[in-house]
Image (tube, rainbow, N blue to C red):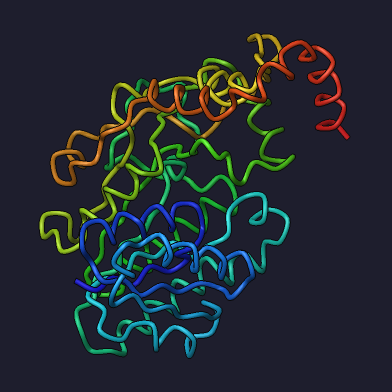
Amino acid sequence: MRILITGAFGRLGQACLLEAARQGHQVNTFDVPSKRNRRAATKFLEAQATGQSGHRSYWGDIRRIDDLEPALEGVDCVIHYAAVLPPVTDDAPELAEEINVNGTRNLIQAVASTGRAIAIQYPSSLTVFGIKQELSPPRRVGEPTHATDNYTDHKLKCEQALIESGLPYVIIRIAVSVGAALQGIDRKTLGSMLGVKADNRLEYIHPDDVATAMVNAVGNEEAMGRILLVGGGTSCQVTQRDLINATLGSAGLTFDDDELGSNAYYTDWLDTEESQRILRYQETSFCDFQEQMHHKLRFVRPFVRPLAPVIKRVLKQWLGS
């Protein structure tokens, strides 16, 4: 099958692109023509032993429907990653809504104009459930959703637009997904991570497993027209404390519970039994992720660990500024 991946050269988009190629799909990619994205596109092509025959790159702005239409040539399915994330959704709300919500509506319009039954797969988020730490886990598909910020509002608006479009769709609400590269961790994101209480529940999923779920949904009749919860499963049902120790702790910065915040956060454990049955994607445990982080940061840790008290004091001042 030929798949269009929008936002193909973001973190999850690249993982999905590699998995689609591995499974033998032909791929159209669509992204903004930044230097970073063009470098990633070149790197992808060079990494394919076969030259990734049939791969087509399209560059443009999802806010312009005329840019999208050529990228749909010969496509059977769209995996729609193109979006901006927090903190951009908070810092530039109008721009974020143009990209996230209106961009998705543009995609729906462009697909509808082809007159073909092109399925759209949308990566939503578990955060649309809102903060439910006071309830017994896990969260399930049928539970009420609640937009608590611009990001979750955009996700819910896009879900609704797809459901009302009349097009074939799969909505996949993804758990917490970070890789060993820790891309996207800026000051605001780091401050938010450290501000969450230690025992706040979260479910982890490796980006590679997200990619497997998304690609395994392509042409999957049982997934069509459904909302599925995708997380790492019971081996990945952890807490904020565990995530901090697996990421910053692997670099030599461990935090005691009283050094973390007191905020509840909109993450939780998920019921993934049905999604795993349909999509067969859970391959990486949280322990696997910890080992990856420990290996990735093995050269950093000996230098950071002795200076950890000083670094944490400086970090606290920096985050509070």
Q: How many marks?
A: 0
The quadrant holding residue 98 is bottom right
The answer to whether residue 262 shows anywhere in this view is no
Identified at 32% across, 62% down, the residue is 49
* Nearer to us in this view, 169 or 33: 33
Q: Position of residue 14 (x, y in %)?
A: 43, 57
Q: Residue at x 21, y 57 (%)?
A: 23
Q: Is residue 227 left or right of residue 10?
A: left
Assign the N terminus to one quadrant of the image.
Answer: bottom left
Left or right: 208 as drawn, with respect to 190: left
**Rendered location of residue 58, percent (x, y):** 45, 80
Residue 240 appears in the rendering:
yes
Q: Nearer the viewer, residue 197 or 29?
A: 29
60 up-or-down from 240: above or below:
below
Q: Is residue 217 left or right of residue 143?
A: left
Q: Quadrant of residue 236?
A: top left
Examine the rendered structure and indicate whether residue 45 appears above or below residue 321: below
Residue placed most toward the observer, 113 or 297: 297
Residue 137 located left or right of residue 99: left
Q: Quarter holding the C terminus?
A: top right
Residue 145 in the image: state x and y as whole percent. Answer: 41, 45
Question: 291 or 106, which lies in front?
Answer: 291
Q: Position of residue 119 (x, y in %)?
A: 24, 70
